[in-house]
Amino acid sequence: MKQYDLIVIGSGSAMNIVEPMIQENPKIKVAVIDKDEPGGICLTRGCIPSKILLYPAELVRTLE
């Protein structure tokens, strides 16, 4: 069984908390669990307008 020092659920804003920990101890073993693409909703399709335009096309492609 793999062992980690820190397990993070979600790769969106949760990473703001983790980043200083990694800077303090670069050898820390971190596992990130995310149901979606890394970066969270804001990065992949929420806050960035170009992603908002791409998301419906990706959804249609998935449904086909």
Image (cartoon, grey):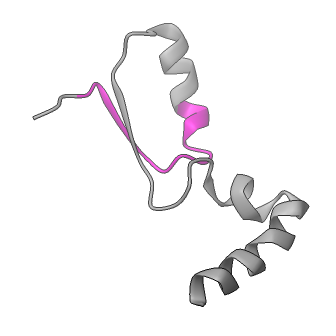
Q: Is residue 57 above or below residue 17?
A: below
Q: Nearer the viewer, residue 5 or 48?
A: 48
Horizontal and vertical percent position of residue 32: 41, 41
Q: Is residue 25 left or right of residue 38?
A: left
Indicate the quadrant where residue 60 lies: bottom right
Which residue is pictured at 56% across the width and 19% down the height? 20
Q: Is residue 32 left or right of residue 23?
A: left
Q: Is residue 16 left or right of residue 6?
A: right
Considering every residue shown, the one lying at the far right of the view is 49
Which residue is pictured at 70% across the width and 57% down the height? 44
Q: Is residue 62 above or below residue 45?
A: below
Locate the N terminus by quadrant.
Answer: top left
User: Range of the magenta residues?
Assistant: 4-17
Q: Is residue 51 left or right of residue 31?
A: right
Locate the C terminus by quadrant.
Answer: bottom right
Q: Is residue 27 above or below residue 55?
A: above
Indicate the quadrant where residue 58 lies: bottom right
Horizontal and vertical percent position of residue 61: 66, 82
Q: Nearer the viewer, residue 58 or 24?
A: 58
Which residue is pictured at 56% across the width and 25% down the height? 19
Horizontal and vertical percent position of residue 46: 76, 64
Which residue is pictured at 49% across the width and 17% down the height? 22
Considering every residue shown, the one lying at the far left of the view is 1
Q: How many marks?
A: 0
Tell me, yes or no, whether the highlighted magenta stretch contains residue 7. yes
Horizontal and vertical percent position of residue 34: 45, 54
Indicate the quadrant where residue 53 lies: bottom right
Considering every residue shown, the one lying at the far bottom of the view is 64
Q: Nearer the viewer, residue 33 or 60?
A: 60
Tell me, yes or no, whether the highlighted magenta stretch contains residue 6. yes
